Amino acid sequence: MIRIRYIFLVVTAAIAARCAMAAGPSMMPSANTRYATDAYPGFDREENIIVKGKKTPRWFSWINGPAKKTASEQLAYAIECEKAESWRAARRGYDSLVREWPASPEAPIAQEKLADLQLGHYADYEEAFEEYRYLMDYYSSQCNYSKIAERLYEVALLMEEEGAQFLFFRLPNTVDVRRAFEGVVLRSPGAKFVPAAMLKIAKLREDADEYDKAVTVYENLRNLHPYTEEAEKSLVLEGAARMKLLKDHGYNRTRVKDTVEFLKMALANNPSEETKKALSGWYEEAVLQLEEEAYKSAKFYDAKTSTRRGAIAAYENFLREYPASRYAEVVSKRIAELKAAGDLKK
């Protein structure tokens, strides 16, 4: 049932993404949209993310509130402050306009200018991201949605670059950066940069040692965007992540079999020679691991506490499954010895 549900969600997300891509900005999410995070397994669920609510007038508004009596006058005032390089006054002016007159035609203009100010002058990428996201969430039909979506992606890239590494240490904003990329994908599922953003999300999952979730994102990327350059890259990245899970978490037959099936599928997908070489090596390694554990299991039935009949059956099953095994000769010899030993009930 879980597998069926997953396939349904992937297909639903794929249809939504293709519709959005075909229709353009008019098909993008609108204000107050609840995003189908279930359609993006490997992403954090919406209820687990702290999202800023709608802006309201601040307390002590006679100090922090608008300097003018109308939205149009306030916008003109804030623009003049910015031209005069009175940055704090401009920022407060734009923000107070949005809070005091949220339904005015000037509000989305002020909100975009506030976001531009956070990005351009203050270079505060986290705050810039929040302000652009607010613009998309609450003024989606009153702004250039496609342009702002691309800007949001660019700011997420800046957040990653700024917080990627300091000396030899990873800064603790990995989760925030990943959630920023997730927010970009959820708000613009049909945008051209979505496959690249999903690669970033998977890589950030790996940076947090969440390889199982990274595998899920890689798989979803290939399902939703199968003919992209990123889908080709995800084959190798997913293969590497799957192999790390095998090595780090001990033997698990289901996990190993799933990995073998994935690698078999990837190899059948006509990858490049370089990709094929990596996948082939992992495939051989995973198959050998399955074979090794199957041989150990068969030997278990050859213990003194088991019947010869059970041991022979186990060995014969092994040969049927792995006829070309490096243990084939040893196993065949042992079967002959057991059969020649006498009564098979013993």
Image (cartoon, grey):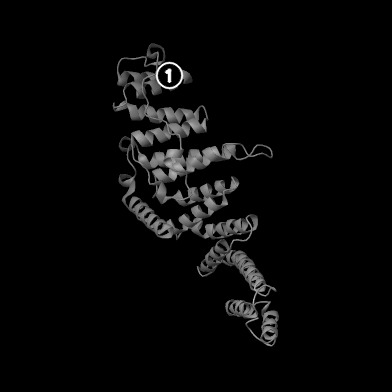
Question: Is 79 situated above or below 178?
Answer: above
Q: Quadrant of residue 73?
A: top left
Residue with the mark numbered 1? 81
Measured as percent of width and height from the top left, residue 188 is found at 39, 45
Q: Is residue 104 left or right of residue 321?
A: left
- The foreground one among 72 and 42 is 42
**Left or right of residue 305: residue 140:** left
Q: Is residue 98 visible?
A: yes
The image quadrant where one finds the N terminus is: bottom left
Report the label total: 1
Q: Nearer the viewer, residue 303 or 291?
A: 303
Amino acid type at mark 1: Cys
- The one nearer the camera, 207 or 102, is 207
Does 2 appear above or below 286?
A: above
User: Position of 11 compared to 272: left or right?
Assistant: left
How packed mark 1 is, by other alpha carbons closer than 10 Å (few <14, some 14-19, many 20 or more), is some
Task: In the rendered view, tell whether residue 171 sits above or below residue 200.
Answer: above
- Image position, residue 66 (x, y; %): 36, 16
Q: Position of residue 299 (x, y in %)?
A: 67, 73
Q: In percent of the image, x 52 and y 38: which residue is there?
A: 176
Observer able to see residue 85? no
Identity of the residue furthest to the top in this view: 62
Tell me the quarter of the image containing the C terminus: bottom right
